[in-house]
Every structure is written in C-alpha cells, then in structure tokens.
Image: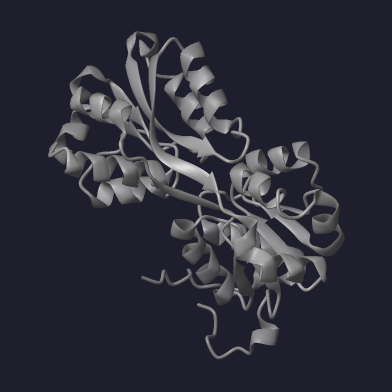
Amino acid sequence: MTDLLLSTARLPLGNKRIVITAPRPYAGRLATAIIQQGGLPIVMPTIETYALDPAPDLDHALQQLRDFSWVAFTSRTGIQAVMLRLQQLDIPLFLLNQCHICAIGQDADQLQALGVRVDLIPKESSPAGLVAELAQIPDIDTQRILVPIPQVERIPEPDIVPNFLADLQQLGLTVVSVPAYVTRRLEATAYAVEVEQIRQGKVDAIAFSSTAEISALLQMVDAETLMKHCVIACFGPYTAGNAKDLGLSVDIVSQDFSSFTGFTAAIAQFFHPASADIPRQDPVILP
C-alpha cells in the first residue's frame, strides 16, 4: 500500500492539474484515482449521458428478450439504462439470464452484483475484443443479438459503435441495435473558467476516456491550443487512434484500459517514470 502520509510532492502526479472530460457517472472514479496519485483533477465533463425516454425500440426489444441468444453491453451507461427500463416496464431481471450476456472489463462486475450472469468478458476490454471472442463460438451465425446503443447528439457519432455493429453482422449474427440512452455534448458556456485555464497554460494534461469527449472538447478549444499547452492522454488505443484522426498528437496511451486505475498509472508514469516501481493501493471509490 502507498504510505498515506507521503507529501503530495513525492507522489507521481504531485500537483499536476489534469482535466477530466468523462461524463459525470465516470468522472468521479477517474478523479479519485488521480487524487490518490497526488494530482489535482479538474472535472470538466464535455458530454453527458442520460436515459432515453421514451425509448420505444428498447421497450419492444426488452419485451421480446426470449427471442435473443445474446445481449451485448458496450458501456456501463448502457447497462444502467437497460436496468432502469426493465424496472419501469416491470420485466423481471432474471429474464436476462435466459440470454447469454457479454460485457467489457469491470462493467461485468456491475451486472454480476445485480445477479445477472455474464457469459463473455473479453480479454481485450473493447468492442473489438467482444467480436473476436464471439467469432470463436460454434454456430454464432445462427444467433440473434441485442445491442443497446447511444443516441448521439450535438457531435459527430464516433465510429466505435457503428464498426462494432458491422463486425457483428460480418459474423452472420442477426443484430438488433436499439437506442437506450443519449450521449450529448454539453454547452461550452458552462466551462468558460476551465477553457481559459487551458488557454493560459495552467493545465498539465487532459485525460480523454472516449472519442465523443474529444469531439466535444474540440468544439470548445482548437487542437493547436490543446497540444501547445497540455499533455494529451487517451484511455486505450482506440480512443488514441480517433484522437489522431481528429488532429491531436497523443502523448499517453493506457495499455491497461480495463479500469481507470490503469489509465491513471500510465499518466503517472509519463510524468514520473520511476512511479512504475512505487507500490500503490487501489483507489478508494467515493460514493
């Protein structure tokens, strides 16, 4: 365990100001991990996620769960949206266990805590990882899969979900994708102070956990300004690849993108290379 009595200056991210662009449900977990390493998180969600209501396509799919062999969750928000809708429709949660469930990384823990059996957790914590392992299942081309997806507003839709759906179809699966929640860019007017800090060079790094966050921030601050003043950190190679396509030079790519602990460790090692040898405790998750 890390000595909790260490001074901030001796911690890997001591007094580094790091902007977090993740939506509110995720930002607290990443901020906590950064604080544990001595950093000063600036929480600036550039997008928000919330349940789609009404959600007629999702309602219809959930009422026909017995028709699906698989349900694929690609985000924690998708899980929460489906759980909420099941409750609102008075559909018993145990009906999910009549399907095979796949989820990514620690998202599976959330399902299992609710009593939902998770049949497939890919070694690579990404939609592409899901596709690779589904491809190994006999007769997968005869099966039907439900995929709750976001309805994207105010930003160009990132290619991750469309590519995932296309890859599933390439396997021969019958794919039913239904909007379950909204991903939406927040207004720049809410972040006048934070944007000015970036422009004045008072931010050390920006931590992006998704492509949507990058697209949204680039509508507030141009790429040249970001790269001039800030280290750019991305949560895994897919986000990093899309960041480059959007005109950003990426300084940090987390190779462990199954949790925010791994992301924070990558940022810490960039600023303090010796931090890889410093024992760390897992971050405490705030309520």
Give left or right: position of 285 versus 110. Answer: right
Q: Which colour scheme is used?
A: one colour
Which residue extends farthest front?
189
Report the residue at 28% width, 20% height from top: 69
Above or below, comparing residue 136 to residue 209 in the picture: above
- Quarter of the C terminus within the rendering: bottom left
Horizontal side of residue 286 vs 198, given as left or right: left
Q: Is 69 placed above or below 109 here?
A: above
Q: What percent of the width, then of the height, locates residue 182?
A: 44, 41
Q: In the image, is 237 to the left or to the right of 67?
A: right
Q: Nearer the viewer, residue 15 or 185?
A: 185
Taking the image as shown, residue 4 lies to the left or right of residue 142, namely right
Which of 183/10 is in front? 183
Give the residue drawn at x 52%, y 30%: 161
Picture mark count: 0
Residue 52 percent coordinates (x, y): 36, 40
In this view of the protein, which residue sits in the foreground, 123 or 53? 53
Position of residue 25 measured from the top left corner of the image (x, y, whole percent): 44, 58
Q: Where is residue 6 in the image (x, y as percent from the top left)?
A: 60, 88
Q: Is residue 6 above or below residue 125?
A: below
Q: Can residue 246 be seen in this view?
A: yes
Residue 104: tell me if it is visible: no
Please name the residue shown 33% across and 43% down the image: 81
Give whichever of 17, 216 is nearer the camera. Answer: 216
User: Residue 192 falls in which quadrant of the image?
Assistant: bottom right
Query: Image quadrant of residue 227?
Result: bottom right
